Image: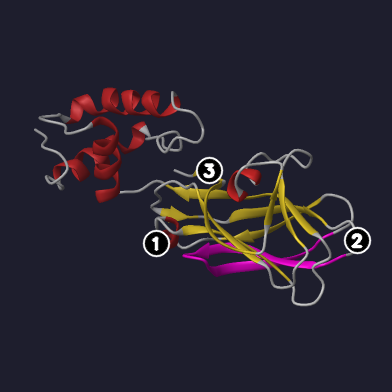
Amino acid sequence: MSLTYTCRPKADYSNNRFRIYGDTSLWSALTSEDDVTSYIGTITPEAGYHALLDHPIVGNCNASTMYIRGRAPDGAPTVTYGTSLAGVFIDTDTFAVTAAWSQDSFSVTPVAGDVNSTNFGVGIETDATNPQDTRISWVRLDLSYGPPTGAGFAYLISSFLGPLVAVGLNEMPGLVHHFNAEAASRPWWHPWNRHRLGMEDCKEMWLALRSHPWRTILA
């Protein structure tokens, strides 16, 4: 089963000479996807910014797309952007920013272990000689992924629903339905909202829960 999730900035990790325009924090200025009301910017060479990304817990990652949107009214600087881990770039591409707002993207297949890290994020860096009033209005990762298996299923279900006692295999469809309804009822930024379980995985999830008594006790 392949799922998609839009990973947007959720917190600042590090900042070197980027400023906020029209918002209260750098990371939130990059989530509105609005060119007018909020963006971040710099006129400094080699300025860098890293944000943590909101992301699901994954079992595997498929080919995904990273996007950036920017503007440089006075020139055409090059920006390096990409995924990062604890403030260090992992996969990157470059974007020749234009005078009008424009968008760039590149294909990336993140490593599942990186995505599951609490320090998984995104980075932006201006070039060494020609920053030219670089402005970035939004950045995101459209992640394509497979759900967790084994311990990941046990972790998700118990995290959402609490300890489960004596749940039989025949009760798993009802549990999955309840899990998905709870997740769907949360706003997009809530950590539950990103997750959905599939009915086709009921047996695998039940076996996973039975194999991890440190999370659950099942019949």
Alpha carbon distance from label 2 to label 3? 37 Å
> For the residue marked with disc 3, what is the amino acid?
Thr
- Mark 3 neighbour class, 10 Å CA radius: few under 14, some 14 to 19, many 20 or more: some
Identify the element where label 2 is drawn: loop
- In the rendered structure, are the residues bearing label 2 and label 1 in contact, judged by CB atoms less than 8 Å apart? no
Instruction: From the image, state whether disc 2 or disc 3 is nearer to you.
Output: 2
User: Which callout, 1 or 3, points at the residue further toward the start of the chain?
Assistant: 3
User: Which callout, 2 or 1, points at the residue further toward the start of the chain?
Assistant: 2
Identify the element where label 1 is drawn: helix
> For the residue marked with disc 1, what is the amino acid?
Gly
- Mark 1 neighbour class, 10 Å CA radius: few under 14, some 14 to 19, many 20 or more: few
x 66%, y 39%: residue: 32
Alpha carbon distance from label 1 to label 3? 17 Å
Q: Is residue 95 visible?
A: yes
- In the rendered structure, are the residues bearing label 2 and label 3 in contact, judged by CB atoms less than 8 Å apart? no
Magenta span of residues: 76-97
The x and y percentages for residue 87 are 51, 66
169, 36: nearer the viewer: 36
> For the residue marked with disc 2, what is the amino acid?
Asp
Residue, disc 3 = 4
Left or right position of 35 against 147: right
Left or right position of 156 against 9: left
Residue, disc 2 = 74
The x and y percentages for residue 179 are 33, 28
The x and y percentages for residue 158 are 23, 37
x 11%, y 30%: residue: 165
Q: How is the image coloured?
A: secondary structure
